[in-house]
């Protein structure tokens, strides 16, 4: 009788896989550079998101990373040559290399800003009315913007008809990432009064010792941003400090203080994926809007496109493990679908990040995606059976809602809370 060799027995394998015997253990399990950032900079910490009726009730701790101002007013930074709004490509390149961000002045004209702002505000309202708004710890996000207006389709292309400075921005991104880079998402991020500041983070989640960015995020304020309106919090130059520390296997020590980004609406702020940053606090009653438009190197993708290529019958019989392995479990920063997946960890069978129901709906021919919505949308449009509703409803059934969830309950300004 054939017996399976003992070396293949999971118990045997576990007994021979103590952490110190595993290769690359330090690298694959490292929590750096963020572990030492948090350890050595106690003013940087995670502000817990507030739910529903607790919106706005959070403890502002003076001296924390979010208790700050713009560079020009900050005692630590005001004499530094921080990035200036510019159209000088040499200045922009050197700002991006030195500080981890650069500001392309007037990349959107006043008319381009106005049309984009109107579309964002209408969509934000429409998604609230439809009960499918995504509330975030800081306010509201509009996900998958490309489905929600022609201006967004063009924006992903950096088309001069919606971003006059598109060609200049494209050249800078190509220099940063190399040719063939792809867009990862386009989200409108609304910071609203009462929201908490986002935790400082790096958008880049891989190769954190890299000498150049693997990812780039173009932040485009379409309302003016500064220390009062929720300008993005960031630590100038942190992209180099953090990647150097990882490369040298050293802790990140005491960091310089964070500032609020200040930029006029229509500035395109190109940020290195290694830069420490996060949404700022909006102290005003007007929504702060920043378009988040991520880009990454051309090769950072699954070689086989399983989202599209797998036969329906294979998907139907797929185990939770097979689905997970093919990429059908989203996490906050990977493979979210119309916003579903934010807050998920990417575990097999985790409803908060499960994607297969979207694909199955498409196979049946009834995947209804959220499109353009607004205050004048009809009842039928607002109440349409968007597949997103069904998937989110299923994920919520019997479970605890993720703090970053879809559904308008708990949004600032929502009287039903
Ligand atoms: O809203 C902002 O200012 C920045 C948001 C951000 O960094 C993110 O969501 O990754
Ligand atoms: Fe970010």
Image (cartoon, rainbow, N blue to C red):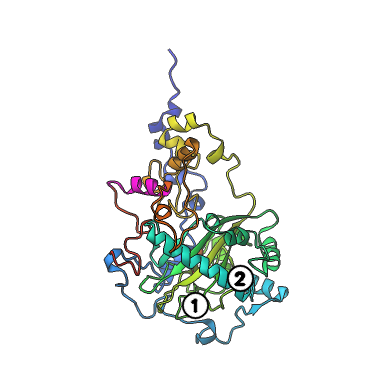
Residue 260 got which mark?
1
- To which residue does mark 2 refer? 112
Horizontally, is 260 left or right of 348 in the view?
A: right
Give SS at disc 1.
Answer: strand
Q: Identify the residue shown where x is 64% and y is 68%.
A: 163
Horizontally, is 92 left or right of 375 in the view?
A: right
Disc 1: CA contacts within 10 A as few (<14), some (14-19) or many (>=20)? many
Disc 2: CA contacts within 10 A as few (<14), some (14-19) or many (>=20)? some
From this view, report whether residue 183 is shown above or below residue 276. Answer: above
Percent x, y for residue 168?
70, 68
Q: Do the residues labelled 2 and 1 touch (CB within 8 Å)?
A: no
Is 172 or 135 nearer to us in this picture? 135
The answer to which quarter of the image holds residue 54 is bottom left
Percent x, y for residue 352?
38, 48
Report the magenta residues as a range. 388-398
Is 59 or 75 nearer to us in this picture? 59
Main secondary structure type of the part rendered in magenta: helix
Q: Which of marks 2 and 1 is nearer the N terminus?
A: 2
Percent x, y for residue 46?
38, 66
Where's the N terminus, which quadrant?
top left
Please tell me whether residue 393 belongs to the stretch shown in magenta. Answer: yes
């Amino acid at each position: 009788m054939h017996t399976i060799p003992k070396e293949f027995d999971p118990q045997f394998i576990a007994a021979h896989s103590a952490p110190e015997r595993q290769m690359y253990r330090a690298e694959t399990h490292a929590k750096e550079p963020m572990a030492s950032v948090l350890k050595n900079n106690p003013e940087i910490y995670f502000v817990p998101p507030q739910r529903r009726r607790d919106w706005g009730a959070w403890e502002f701790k003076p001296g924390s990373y979010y208790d700050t101002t713009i560079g020009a007013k900050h005692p630590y930074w005001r004499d530094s040559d921080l990035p200036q709004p510019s159209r000088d490509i040499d200045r922009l390149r050197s700002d991006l290399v030195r500080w981890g961000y650069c500001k392309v002045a007037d990349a959107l004209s006043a008319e381009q800003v106005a049309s984009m702002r109107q579309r964002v505000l209408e969509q934000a309202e429409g998604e609230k009315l439809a009960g499918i708004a995504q509330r975030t710890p800081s306010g509201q996000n509009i996900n998958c913007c490309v489905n929600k207006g022609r201006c967004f389709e063009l924006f992903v292309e950096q088309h001069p008809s919606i971003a006059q400075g598109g060609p200049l921005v494209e050249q800078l991104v190509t220099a940063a990432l190399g040719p063939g880079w792809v867009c990862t998402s386009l989200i409108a991020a609304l910071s609203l009064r009462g929201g908490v500041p986002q935790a400082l983070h790096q958008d880049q989640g891989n190769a954190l010792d890299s000498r150049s960015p693997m990812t780039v995020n173009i932040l485009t304020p379409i309302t003016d941003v500064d220390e009062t309106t929720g300008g993005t919090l960031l630590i100038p130059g942190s992209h180099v400090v953090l990647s150097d520390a990882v490369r040298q296997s050293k802790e990140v020590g005491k960091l310089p203080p964070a500032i609020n980004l200040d930029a006029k609406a229509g500035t395109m702020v190109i940020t290195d994926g290694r830069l420490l940053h996060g949404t700022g606090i909006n102290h005003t009653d007007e929504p702060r809007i920043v378009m988040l438009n991520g880009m990454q190197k051309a090769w950072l993708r699954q070689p086989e496109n399983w989202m599209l290529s797998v036969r329906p019958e294979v998907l139907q019989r797929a185990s939770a493990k097979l689905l997970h392995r093919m990429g059908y479990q989203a996490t906050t920063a990977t493979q979210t679908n119309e916003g579903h997946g934010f807050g998920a960890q990417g575990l097999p069978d985790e409803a908060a990040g499960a994607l297969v129901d979207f694909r199955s709906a498409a196979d049946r021919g009834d995947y209804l995606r959220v499109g353009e919505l607004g205050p004048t949308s009809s009842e039928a449009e607002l109440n349409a059976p968007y597949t997103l509703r069904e998937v989110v409803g299923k994920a919520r059934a019997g479970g605890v809602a993720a703090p970053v969830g879809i559904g308008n309950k708990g949004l600032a300004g929502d009287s039903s809370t």
